Image (cartoon, rainbow, N blue to C red):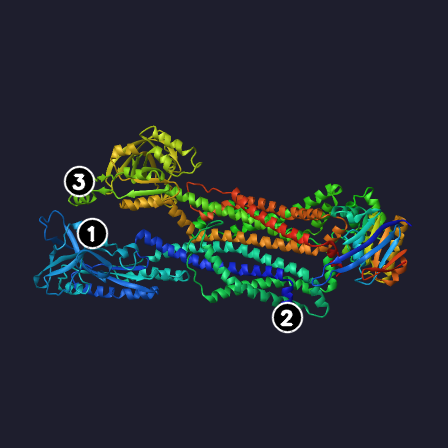
Amino acid sequence: METIIKTENIKKCFPVFGADDFYALKGLSMEIPKGELTILKGRSGSGKTTLLNMLSALDTPSEGKIYFDGNEITKYNANGREKLRRYEIGYIFQTVALLPVMNAYENVEFGLRLAKFKGNYDQRIKECLEQVGMEKRMKHMPYEMSGGEQQRVAIARAIAHKPKVIFADEPTASLDSTMSLQVVKVFKELIQKEKVTIVMTTHDTDLMDVGSKLYELEDGEIIGSK
Amino acid sequence: MFTFIKNKLLHKRWLNLCILIGIILLTGIFICGQLYMDAGLKRTLQKKFSDYMRTNNQNPGVVSVSAKYIYGEDTSINSAFFGEVEKIPPKIEQTMQLPVKSTIAYRASMKGLVKGTYEKDESVWKKYMEFAGMTDLEQHIDLISGTLFGEQSCEDDVIECVVSKHTLDTYGFILGEEITFAQVNRTNDRPLKFKIVGVFKEKSEDASEPEYYWVNPVSYYEDSIFVREDFFPLLMEQVNKEQLEVKTNFFVFFDYKAVEPSNINKLIQSAELINETGGELEKVKCSCAMLNSLKAYDAEDEKLCATMWILQVPMILLLLVFIYMVSKQMLELEQNEIAMLKSRGVSKGQVVQVYLFQSSLLALAGGILGIPLGYYLCIMLGSTNSFMNFVNRTSFQIDCSALRLIAYAVLAGIVSVAFITLPVIRYAKLSIIELKQNNKNNTQPVWRKFFLDFILFAISIYYWKVFSGQEDYIAQQVISGKGTNSILFLDSSIFMLGAGLISLRIIKILVQLFFLIFKKRLPAFLYAAFMQIMRTERKYIFTSTFMILTIAMGIFHANVAATINKNSEERIRYNLGTDFILQEKWKDNLIQVRKAKTDGKQLDVAYEEPDFTKYDALRDEVESITKVIIDDRVIINYNNRKYEGNRLMAIDTKEFGETAWMKDGVLDKHWYEYLNIISQEPDAILVSKNFQKKFNAKIGEQLVYTRQDVFNRETSVHKGIIRGFIDAWPGFYINEDTEKEGKSQYLIITNYAKIVYDSGITPYEVWIKTKGNTDCIYDYLENQGKQYIKTEDANVYVTENKNSALFQATNGFLTMSYMITLLLCTVGFLIFWILSIRQRELIFGIYRAMGISMKEIIGILITEHLFSSVLSILIGSIVGIISSELFVPLIGIAYSPEKHPLPLEIVNSGQEVMKILGNISVVLVVCIIVLGFIISKFKITQALLLGED
């Protein structure tokens, strides 16, 4: 199995006033398989979001190395990380993160513009919205959609520019279990059709088994993996 | 509830602080306006009194009662009559209802022929004099020589008296001389004989300010022989009434400083009543000196009041809009809370109550802080000199009762509470579901739906058209004291609002067009920025409108102020003719001429020219000096008819050209060319254009004109050849009023040398062009110690004009409103942007997560700025310049309504525009720096976490 992201002993510490530094990550080494769904599991405060932020180049570790597609991204400057996020990565956030001034179609289009997508925009936008089952709601503004619908549009936006990896931080947290399963179903379909890698965090035990790889975190350490 | 509201206030402390500032300013301005109006009215009134004092050299508070002797055989009629006259002063006091400073009685005998001790030949010069007693005379004179009269008894044959120096000068008496009434006897057939024991002049401290004594100057009493007041009636008893009667004058001095603007109308009525019915006794004349001042004030106060309101209203409206805007912003942030409260069963009334209570607290605090601010602003107003120009001058008196101040503050508070609470009612109606639905409707603003912008614009243009056809009518209204039509002022504001809103509508279309055309090529961050601008336009409109109005009004007001200041200053300089005019008292033989006249002899008036070369000492410190003969007694002989009362101006053309003040472009060619024309030919004259119009005179015609001496005797005949007609000349303007009555004054300008050659030397004025500073002239005059009958300083008039309540109020209020709008603009702008960034923190986090760089985020903000603020500034500037072009000419009329040779010049000052744009740019840059600082502070991961809360 090919690996797309690899970490070597990454640590993240935050200074605490009047006490020793707090380590949110305590030296993690892990590998994310390419073209699979990887799940980071843990209770809140376990460090899974911090880890996801490191992996997705939103934040930098205090120590350790991260390799993305063979390149050591911990060496990148802010500009390099921005480029990486822009072209190689797609994001799905816990809360609904559509741009409120744009409708579904435009939100996806914005993702394409940002990554300077080469190809037919209209076709790709419709294709992505179709994949998440939102093709009929293209012209709707975010406030005219339910939470699940908005999240699906967010997924469409995240995959539109064909990123190598999609990171999803608790994408189902604000959804009920039926909708959560729907979202996961969409993820699986995407992996098949788009050959994309997906990394998601969750604390939902129902979703533990849907991924092909699972890391369980507690207190900034991996306590188990499958 | 109190803790709840306290927490609520503290939670949104910045917004509440803004509302508080709004209320403080509102209260402050409202109070300042009222205080200024009161103080300005009072000052205008006192100015009228001091004008009266200056021109008449007389206390304006005096009511004079003069009773004339009734000729008749029965002397008892007279004593009964004067008995009645004695009762008049108390009646006057009762009618006027003002504090009385003093009542002076001047009782005198009628005039009789007198003879001095040293007079040889009676027939040479007949002297008629009266003897008199005057209340407290001793306290209001300075003895030059001799002593005061001592105790006197009826047995004395010679009565001690004092006379003024003028008496000595006129009649040639000397100290110690005895004056005998030639045809009057006392009881026991004694002659009526007085001995001059003292000579007096007016008490010097009384001379500086004509306070409560000398209504008529001392020189007026040159025929009076003053005896002790208490002795006068005793002496009168002894005089044969058939030979010499008594007469009485009273001067009742009221404290004119106690006149209040509020009771002017009643006072005018009282004064008129006194003037009319004081004379219910035949031969009694009462005259109230202040009547004309009161009437002149009455004509002006309405104008001031109207102007004050007009100046205040736009500012108050802007402040109310500001308060409304901020409280609406706050409500938008709190709408979830309101909806939540509602869903938990809180009634609509209770929600409104919470806000009512909250805003009342703010209004209370605002009122308390606003009162001193208003007071302070009023003091500051009193020290503005022109637009945005403060001078250090002691401001005028402000007095206002605490009760009134509080009443004003309460009024301002109620209005602001209403403006804060009104929008709540709408929000309080909505439940949480309705709220969500309501949010979805990104509807058009009401004004846009109903085309209110076009309607406002049309209304303003309509009124502009109406007004611009009626300049003369407006001027007439202003001159007649009716004040300006307030619609005229409001119309300019309506125009700015209408034009601004239309521009926003057009901008919206342009932005959409731009976006459609360049959509494909726009980089992602600009795409996002445009989306933001177009989809949330409604949020921008308020700030944009605010900005447009601020800038447009700023420019417009600056131009109004510049125009009225410049035009009135130029007119003052033009009317005077140059910077400084002097006229020395020339030595003459008028006394001899007068004497010769009474004796039926012919003697010409002769003058002795004072040394002119002494002014050479001044030449280094001033630009230039020239002699100008101004003679207003010229008779023009034309078409075999005589026209009197014309003005001759004899000038040294070169020096005059260097010295006089004249505006270019007023005459059909440069005025120097006219000077050249007359300099080339001794007989050449320039004549004012009204002469040409009246008589259809032609260039090249000969004009015969005659000069007269002070006794209106023709002295010299001149022949001039008309070489030009001019409609404006330094120091000459045609009085429209007399022109209408058919009494035209014509002006003849000719060469100084020629006039002197033909009619000898006559007094001339010395015209001086200064280097800007007149101190050197005053120093010079003081050192010279000569007597000047005329010293006129254009700067003094200019300052006086600027200090007039109307001009000062206008300048002050325009400056104040500009500074306040600028402040509001800054605060409003910051609130809008900080809130819009705070509300979008999550979105910026998403942008950053998606790989948009910090630079691009700043790019988004700058683009949004560009299309909201910068465009607003541009629109504001254009609207301001256009409205200046349209409305300043009309408003200018309100300040200089009289027809004048200098046409009203509209100042569209680029400098002011730059100043305003500069100020605004500083505000913008500061705001962007603050915003940049806020944005650079937040981290992506934290911004994203925000969403998880």
Q: Chain of mark 2?
A: B
Q: Amino acid at mark 3?
A: Gln
Outermost residue on the bottom side: it is B1
Q: Which dot, 2 or 3, sits closer to the camera?
A: 2
Quadrant assignment, res B205: bottom left
Q: Amino acid at mark 1?
A: His
Tell me where residue B183 appears, x and y as whole percent: 11, 56
Q: Which dot, 2 or 1, sits closer to the camera?
A: 2
Instruction: In the rendered view, tell whether residue B30 sits above or below residue A127.
Output: below
As drawn, is A75 to the left or to the right of B509? Answer: right
Element at label 1: helix
The earlier-in-sequence mark between 2 and 1 is: 2
Disc 1 to disc 3: CB gap under 8 Å: no
Of A219 and B767, the residue lying toward us: A219
Q: Which residue is mark 1?
A: B166
As drawn, is A160 to the left or to the right of B414? Answer: right
Instruction: In the rendered view, tell whether residue B704 sits above or below residue B99.
Output: above
Rounded to the nearest angstrom, the CA distance separating label 1 from label 3 is: 25 Å
Q: Which mark is residue B772?
A: none
Mark 3 is surrounded, within 10 Å at the Cα level, by few (under 14), some (14 to 19) or many (20 or more) other residues, namely few
As drawn, is B655 to the left or to the right of A207? Answer: left
As drawn, is A222 to the left or to the right of B606? Answer: right
Rendered residue at 53%/56% (across/down):
B313
Q: Which residue is mark 2?
A: B3
Q: Which residue is mark 3?
A: B602
Rounded to the nearest angstrom, the CA distance separating label 2 from label 1 is: 84 Å
